[in-house]
Amino acid sequence: MQSFDLIQKSRQDYEKTLTKEMTEEELKEITALLERQGWSPMLCDTPVPLYDTPVHAGNPVEPGSIPPDMVLVPKALLATQPQMMVRVKGNSMVDAGIEDGDVVKMTLDTTPRDGDIVVVAIDSECTVKSYYEDDEGQRWLVPQNKAESERYKVIRLDDELVNVHLCGVVDEVLKPLPRVSSRVLRSAVAKAKKLYEEEPKVSGQRVAAVIRLLGKEIKIQRHWYAVCRGMMDVCAFGEDEYDIFCTRVAEVLPAHKHLPRVDEMQAMAVESFAKPIVKWDEGRSPVKGARFRAYKRLGERTIQLLTMKEEAFQSI
C-alpha cells in the first residue's frame, strides 16, 4: 500500500492545483450550474490507490508488484473500510458491465454475498468473477459472458486450490472515456457545414420589407403567428423567439392597428402549428376550414417572400 506521507503529498498537490486554476467561488458556481441542470456533482477530493497492473477478467494471472498511482475520488463514494482500484483485462465479465480496460473500485477484506463481484487471488494469481456459495457451502467463481461460455469456465474453490484469498468486493466500475476518431468527426462536421451552407440567408432588411408587405394584409392580430412561424422556418428568428419577433414588428410598423403580442403567439403554437409550416395538418391544428387555409397561405407566402431572389423581390 502507498505510504501515508505519499497520500498526503497527493492531497497537497491537488489542493495547490485547485487553488491555482480555480477559486472556491468558481467551483461553487460550476457545482450550482450542474445541479440546476439535473446533475449530482461530487468533488474528487480523497486519494485511493490505483494498481495499474491488470487484474484479469479471464484466467487468473499474477498481478505483479508495480507501485500504485493515487486517484482522487469523491469521499461520499468511499466505504468506511479500506478501498483500492485495479484495472481489468479481459472480457469474461462483459455481461456484468465490466469490459477490458475498465477500472474497478473494491472494498478490501469484506465478506461477499451471493451475486457480488469479487477480486480473488488464487496462488498469488488474481481474477475478477461473480461469487456464489451453494447449499453445500461450496464456493464458486462464475464468469459473466454467455457468448464465450466455452472459453471462460466456472472456477470451484475446492481444497485442491491453496492460498485462496478474497482481495475485495467490487462496488463500482469506472469506464475509460472513449475518444472518437478524427475521421468520424470530420465526416459529421462536413455534413453540418453543408447544411449550414444550404440554410437560407435572410437579411434584416428583407425581414423588415416582408413585415411591411404582409402588414397590409393582416386584419387579425393572431394572423401574425403565420408570419412568425414562416420566419422561424427559414431561420430569420430562432425557435420560440416570439418576443424578438413582436419587438421587430413594432419597430417596423409602430402604427399598425393589430400589432402581435407574445402571449397570442404562444397561444397559437400548439398541435401541428408548433411545427414547421410544411408539417401543418388541419386535423391537428387550433383552427379549421377557411381559417386554417388562411393561416397556411400567409405562412407559405412569408417563406416565399423571404427566400426569393433579390431581383424578383424588388419587382413586387
Image (cartoon, helix red, strand yellow):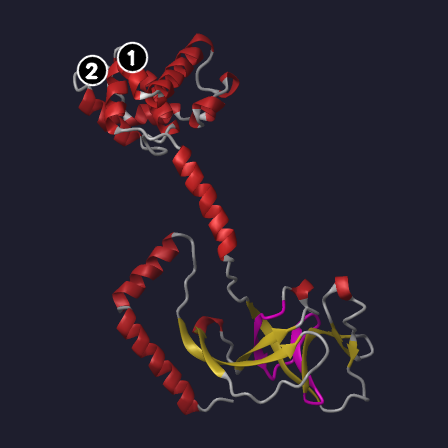
Of the image marks 1 and 2, the number of the one nearer the N terminus: 1
Q: Amino acid at mark 1?
A: Ile
Q: CA distance from mark 1 to mark 2?
A: 9 Å
Q: Is residue 121 magenta?
A: yes
- Residue in view at x 39 percent, y 15 percent: 295
Answer whether labels 1 and 2 touch (C-beta < 8 Å).
yes
The residue at 50%/19% (across/down) is 281
Where does residue 240 sit, x and y in percent of width and height? 35, 33
Q: Which mark is residue 256?
A: 2
Residue receiving disc 1: 218
Tally of numbered discs: 2
Asked which secondary structure carries label 1, the reply is loop
97 horizontally vs 311: left or right: right
Q: Position of residue 263 (x, y in %)?
A: 31, 26
Q: Amino acid at mark 2?
A: His
Q: Residues within 10 Å of mark 1 (few under 14, many from 20)?
A: some
For the C terminus, which image quadrant? top left
* Residues drawn in magenta: 99-124
Q: What is the quadrant of residue 34 in the picture?
A: bottom left
Q: From the viewer's perspective, is residue 249 above or below residue 41?
A: above
Report the residue that reaches farthest toward the left.
Answer: 255
Extreme residue toward the front, this view? 311
Foreground pick, 36 / 174: 174
Q: Return the x and y of residue 14 as percentages of the image width and height.
A: 35, 78
In-image side of 53 versus 7 (left or right): right
Find out whether residue 15 is within the magenta segment: no
Q: Find residue 241 and report its horizontal and vertical position in percent.
A: 31, 33
Q: Residue 124 occupies which quadrant of the picture?
A: bottom right
